[in-house]
Image: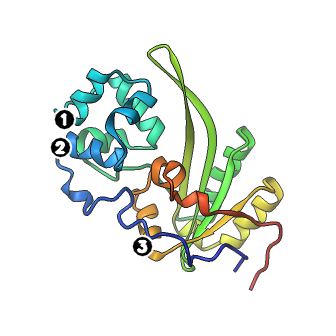
């Protein structure tokens, strides 16, 4: 095991964005509310470059917006377009790998392309990697700042966590670690935690991270 911040003060996020059951989201209105995750509707939408009429149609009438608007929501929140439109699959994107080699190939390719900030997250039994990168997209002529997010989980990460940690020690000295609860790890693995609950919320999981200057194996 490597040294990491204690889970003592890390909140249990429950079902990710504060929802009781993913299966309850049978219409677009309930799904967009889940994505917003308790934020004020209009400030949320306006921060993404949407007009008040577009926001109102979504959050008051449950009307799905145009394709570009949906794509921008999915991009900003790391959400699944299929789930937003049809309720199929999981709300947020997670890359699952059963094989260590496949997971490492995917992660190393990402680091070769951009200067991603990596986080290793564990509940003591399972491991996942979360990578973040500042980005921008255009919304109605405005450039909107957001955080690109990649979540990589599965047996390929858990079975060789130390190998992945050693790789990141060489490739990205800024690797950070978080120890969390089993319930939060469930949400992460099942695609119930998006950019808000991972990065931007006041108690966002990644805000609990600390940099690991050294590693200790057991």
The colouring scheme, among rainbow, by chain, secondary structure or one colour, is: rainbow
Q: Looking at the image, which residue sits at the far bottom?
A: 218
- Seen at 54% across and 60% down, the residue is 205
Q: Position of residue 141 (x, y in %)?
A: 49, 13
**Residue 169 occupies which quadrant of the picture?**
bottom right
Task: Name which of mark 2 and mark 3 comes first in the sequence.
Answer: 2
Q: Please tell me the numbered disc located at residue 82.
A: none
Specify few, some or many for label 2: CA neighbours under 10 Å numbering under 14, 14-19, or 20 or more: some
Give the label on residue 183, or none.
3
Total number of numbered discs in the rendering:
3
Q: Secondary structure at mark 2?
A: loop
Q: Nearer the viewer, mark 2 or mark 1?
A: 1
- Sequence-earlier tag: 3 or 1: 1
> Circle 1: is it few (<14), some (14-19), or many (20+) Cα within 10 Å?
some
Identified at 66% across, 73% down, the residue is 5
Residue 2 pos. (x, y %): 72, 76
Q: Residue at x 35, y 44 (%)?
A: 36
- Labels 3 & 1 near each other (Cβ < 8 A): no
What distance separates the C-alpha of mark 2 from that of mark 3? 26 Å
Q: Judging from the image, what secondary structure is the residue with disc 3 in? A: helix
Q: Position of residue 49 (x, y in %)?
A: 43, 24
Of the numbered discs 2 and 1, the one sitting upstream in the chain is 2
Asked where in the image residue 62 lies, by quadrant, the reply is top left
Q: Which mark is residue 62?
A: 1
SS at circle 1: loop
What residue occupies the far top of the structure in this picture?
141
Quick check: 107 above or below 153? above
Residue 107 appears in the rendering: yes
Q: Name the residue carrying label 2.
A: 27
- Marks 2/1 in contact by CB < 8 Å: the verdict is yes
């Amino acid at each position: 095991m490597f040294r990491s911040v204690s889970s003592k003060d890390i909140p249990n996020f429950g079902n990710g964005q504060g929802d009781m059951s993913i299966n309850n989201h049978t219409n677009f209105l309930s799904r967009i509310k889940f994505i917003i995750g308790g934020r004020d509707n209009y400030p949320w939408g306006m921060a993404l470059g949407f007009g008040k009429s577009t926001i109102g149609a979504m959050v008051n009438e449950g009307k799905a917006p145009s394709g570009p608007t949906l794509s921008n929501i999915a991009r900003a929140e790391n959400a699944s377009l299929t789930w937003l439109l049809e309720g199929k699959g999981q709300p947020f994107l997670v890359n699952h790998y059963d094989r260590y080699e496949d997971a490492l190939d995917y992660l190393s390719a990402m680091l070769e392309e951009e200067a991603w900030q990596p986080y290793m997250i564990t509940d003591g039994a399972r491991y996942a990697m979360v990578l973040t990168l500042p980005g921008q997209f255009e919304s109605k002529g405005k450039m909107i700042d957001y955080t690109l997010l990649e979540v990589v989980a599965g047996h390929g990460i858990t079975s060789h966590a130390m190998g992945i940690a050693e790789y990141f020690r060489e490739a990205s000295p800024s690797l950070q670690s978080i120890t969390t609860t089993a319930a939060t790890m469930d949400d992460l693995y099942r695609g119930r935690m998006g950019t808000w609950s991972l990065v931007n919320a006041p108690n966002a999981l990644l805000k609990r991270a600390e940099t690991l200057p050294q590693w200790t194996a057991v």
